[in-house]
């Protein structure tokens, strides 16, 4: 694919009241559970971005009728990257053997969660993805799914995709995750739907719990409890899942880029409506407030167990903070843009316990450290995090996205606050999670 080069010039003003596209994690899960349910699931605000479209295509190849309708409109405005999606559920037993290799593209969530479902099918499926995805660790799912009885072959003994999965006849598992991971936990819970009795997953910390909330909403028997920092989730096999109408909130992970852009702009005042604020995901709100951000949450409500609200921010003087431990899974995807905020803060910010960032869509510790250092930022890569010394002016340069959507958007936000023009190579990467990003940024610069 041709690499898109984007020129970004500094701006003094980021103003407006907007919505961001639907939550990526929730969109994937709604499509998958809709496929396994009885009846027609309607998903409002589904994220129409590359990652979630890969999930829909995989489901379609598994024999699930999927329809993407017109983009939803809110208050007369065209929504950026959200649509209504209808899924004709096939129940737990109605998926068909795919004739083609399932392509998960760049999406770890598609590959890992779908592996859990495929482990429950008595047929054989092949699944692959792009270069980045084929470099990411899959043994974290292949090892426990094999323990449940699935036969899985992958490169290097099942460590990497492409994967071949022949499932069926699973047995329940009691499994302690070596690290907090929502994708692994979810893969095992989805496989647990196909195992008689209770499948139990223990996590050393709390990763996002969208799968648990949605399984309950679709009618599965599920119990979640906490033992100190350890969390336990149990799901009972062979439920009858009932189709739902799912309302997907805006993605806080996408909103985070705009929030930081407004916070560091000399004249920033931004409202983002209907954003997901699930407490397992809202670490960025807490971190920005600890840095001194003028940030308010209003209009809070709960829909199907998911907390949703409006986030308002304005330009703020930020200060450095230290982050680590249980906070990290709550803001893991926001660390690249948090590093940008830290460069505009007084003092030092240290982020530890975040070695997982090395195995995301890119090595995010290395990628963000390289990009921001090129701009003149004082940022040091640590074995498990970043040390950032803020308060030093950034300059516009040539930099690259490493094909990673969140690196592209974090560098774009930094470029808005730099002196001079930045040229970002690989700017098309934003389409993975936030297709309207460039357009929305233009609108906010105009203060609409
Ligand atoms: C996701 C879980 C997280 C996150 C990823 C999306 C999900 O990864 O980083 O972008 O939708 O379940 P982990 O599996 O490491 O928690």
Image (cartoon, grey):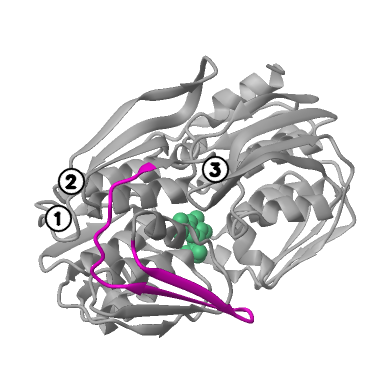
Q: Which residue is mark 1?
A: 95
Q: Residue at x 23, y 48 (%)?
A: 59
Question: Residue 54: x percent and y percent?
Answer: 31, 45
Of the 4 image quadrants, the one containing the N terminus is top left
Q: What range of the chain is rendered magenta?
A: 220-245
Q: Residue at x 67, y 48 (%)?
A: 337
Disc 3 to disc 1, how far (Cα)?
29 Å
Q: Mark 3 or mark 1, which has the lower sequence index?
A: 1
Q: Which residue is mark 2?
A: 64
Q: Which residue is mark 3?
A: 251
Disc 1 to disc 2, how far (Cα)?
7 Å
Q: Report whether the residue tagged 1 is closer than 8 Å to ligand 1.
A: no
Evaluate whether residue 398 shows in this view: no
At mark 2, the secondary structure is loop
Q: Nearer the viewer, residue 352 or 371?
A: 352
Q: Mark 2 or mark 3, which has the lower sequence index?
A: 2
In which quadrant of the rendered view does residue 276 lie?
A: top right
Question: Residue 273: x percent and y percent?
Answer: 63, 33
């Amino acid at each position: 694919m041709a690499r898109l080069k984007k020129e970004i010039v500094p701006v003094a003003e980021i103003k407006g009241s907007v919505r961001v596209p639907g939550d990526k994690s929730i969109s994937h899960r709604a499509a998958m559970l809709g496929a396994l349910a009885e009846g027609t699931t309607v998903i409002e605000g589904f994220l129409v971005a590359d990652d979630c479209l890969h999930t829909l295509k995989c489901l379609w190849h598994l024999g699930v009728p999927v329809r993407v309708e017109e983009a939803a409109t809110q208050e007369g405005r065209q929504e950026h990257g959200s649509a209504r999606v209808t899924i004709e559920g096939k129940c737990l037993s109605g998926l068909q053997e795919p004739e083609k290799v399932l392509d998960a593209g760049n999406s770890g969530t598609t590959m890992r969660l779908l592996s859990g479902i495929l482990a429950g099918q008595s047929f054989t499926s092949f699944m692959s993805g792009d270069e980045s995805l084929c470099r990411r660790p899959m043994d974290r799912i292949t090892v426990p799914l094999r323990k449940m009885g699935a036969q899985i072959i992958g490169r290097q003994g099942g460590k990497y995709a492409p994967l071949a999965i022949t499932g069926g006849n699973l047995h329940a598992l009691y499994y302690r995750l070596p690290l907090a991971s929502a994708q692994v936990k979810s893969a095992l819970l989805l496989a647990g739907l196909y195992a008689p009795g209770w499948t139990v997953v223990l996590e050393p910390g709390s990763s996002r719990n969208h799968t648990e909330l949605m399984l309950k909403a679709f009618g599965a028997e599920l119990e979640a409890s906490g033992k100190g920092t350890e969390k336990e989730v149990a799901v009972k096999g062979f439920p009858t899942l009932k189709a739902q109408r799912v309302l997907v909130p805006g993605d806080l992970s996408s909103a985070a880029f705009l929030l930081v852009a407004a916070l560091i702009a000399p004249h920033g005042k931004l409202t983002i409506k209907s954003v997901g604020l699930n407490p397992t995901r809202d670490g960025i709100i807490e971190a920005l407030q600890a840095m001194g951000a003028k940030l308010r949450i209003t209009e809070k409500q709960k829909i199907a167990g998911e907390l949703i609200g409006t986030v308002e921010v304005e330009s703020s003087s930020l200060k450095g903070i230290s982050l680590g431990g249980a906070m990290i899974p709550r803001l893991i995807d926001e660390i690249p843009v948090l590093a940008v905020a830290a460069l505009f803060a007084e003092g030092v910010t240290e982020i530890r316990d975040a070695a997982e960032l090395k195995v995301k869509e890119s090595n995010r510790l290395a990628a963000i450290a390289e990009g921001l250092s090129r701009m003149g930022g004082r940022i040091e890569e640590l074995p498990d995090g970043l040390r950032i010394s803020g308060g030093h002016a950034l300059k516009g340069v040539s930099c690259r996205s490493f094909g990673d959507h969140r690196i592209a958007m974090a560098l774009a936000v930094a470029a808005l606050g730099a002196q001079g023009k930045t040229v970002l190579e690989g700017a098309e990467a934003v389409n993975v999670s936030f297709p309207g990003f460039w357009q929305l940024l233009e609108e906010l610069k105009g203060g609409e």
